[in-house]
Image: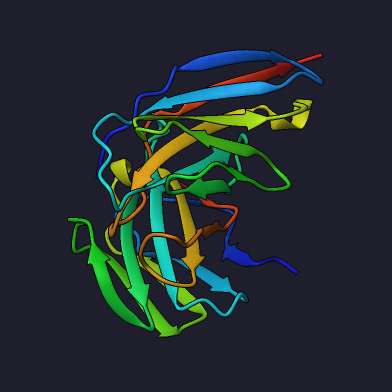
């Protein structure tokens, strides 16, 4: 069974559209994350949720809105997509937020904005 | 979090040990050293982490110097599937911050 899964794997869309990426983890973890990896391969954290509560928001534009319906899911909704949003988005989870805990990453969603 | 310095790339022959260095001279007492890797087009994968003692698991060994200012990740018998970008991360009570990592190329 896949520990952290994301859908869709690929997403191609036009500028200005609204899209969502879904993430689910079956590890029983309390904390979930969204990361963005840009074309230069830098991997940066965007959000972190612990028990459905937002705990980290790394100055991400308001067009990005994470939603956590329960501990096992953290979805990412993006409004008014821009060319610069093209990247690979990774979801991850861990038992706790802070040090001493490994993070498990999903396979990624490659978003292309045309 | 303390910053880390890694060589941009390394080569290793299949079956040989791969020793990946990492400098973290500004590490503080409560910060752990983590290693992750990212195989092309996949999500990062946790390898190992440690505070001050050397650690070993089924994937690798982590050697941390006594002053904790540097560490080495050892893949004892590298395979072609170990070709990846390896990230050394120093982390305290904060999030993971990925740098540029070391691109390890394992060749036949």
What's the colour scheme? Answer: rainbow
- Residue placed at 57% from the left, 80% from the top? A28
Give the image location of residue B75, x and y in percent: 68, 30
Snapshot quadrant of residue A43: top left
Q: Is residue A104 left or right of residue A82?
A: right
Give the image location of residue A64, x and y in percent: 28, 63
- Residue placed at 25% from the left, 65% from the top? A56
Q: Is residue A106 left or right of residue B17?
A: left
Q: Considering the image in quadrants, where does the N terminus of chain A appear?
A: bottom right
**Does A90 sit above or below residue A70?**
above
> Can residue B42 be spotted in the picture?
yes
- Residue placed at 19% from the left, 57% from the top? A61
Q: Is residue B9 left or right of residue B78?
A: left
Give the image location of residue A49, x and y in percent: 35, 73
Q: Residue furthest front?
A: B66
In terms of depth relative to the viewer, which is nearer, A60 or B72?
A: B72
**Does B31 sit above or below residue A66?**
above
Q: Considering the image in quadrants, where does the C terminus of chain A appear?
A: top left
- Residue placed at 37% from the left, 83% from the top? A52
Give the image location of residue B22, x and y in percent: 43, 27
In terms of depth relative to the viewer, which is nearer, B29 or B5?
A: B29
């Amino acid at each position: 069974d896949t520990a952290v899964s994301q859908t869709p794997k690929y997403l191609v869309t036009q500028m200005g559209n609204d899209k969502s990426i879904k993430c689910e983890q079956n590890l029983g973890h309390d904390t979930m994350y969204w990361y963005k990896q840009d074309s230069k391969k830098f991997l940066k954290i965007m959000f972190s949720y612990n028990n459905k509560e937002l705990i980290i928001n790394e100055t991400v534009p308001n067009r990005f809105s994470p939603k956590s319906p329960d501990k096992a899911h953290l979805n990412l909704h993006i409004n008014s997509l821009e060319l610069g949003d093209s990247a690979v988005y990774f979801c991850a989870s861990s038992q706790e937020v802070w040090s001493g805990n490994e993070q498990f990453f999903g396979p990624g969603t490659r978003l292309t904005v045309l | 979090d303390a910053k880390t310095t890694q060589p941009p790339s390394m080569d290793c022959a299949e079956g040989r040990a791969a020793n990946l260095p990492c400098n973290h001279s500004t590490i503080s007492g409560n910060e752990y050293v983590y290693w992750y890797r990212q195989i092309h087009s996949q999500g990062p994968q946790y390898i190992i982490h440690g505070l001050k003692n050397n650690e070993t698991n089924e994937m690798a060994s982590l050697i941390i110097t006594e002053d904790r200012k540097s560490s080495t990740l050892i893949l004892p018998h590298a395979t072609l599937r170990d070709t990846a970008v390896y990230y050394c991360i120093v982390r305290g009570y904060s999030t993971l911050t990925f740098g540029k990592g070391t691109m390890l190329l394992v060749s036949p």
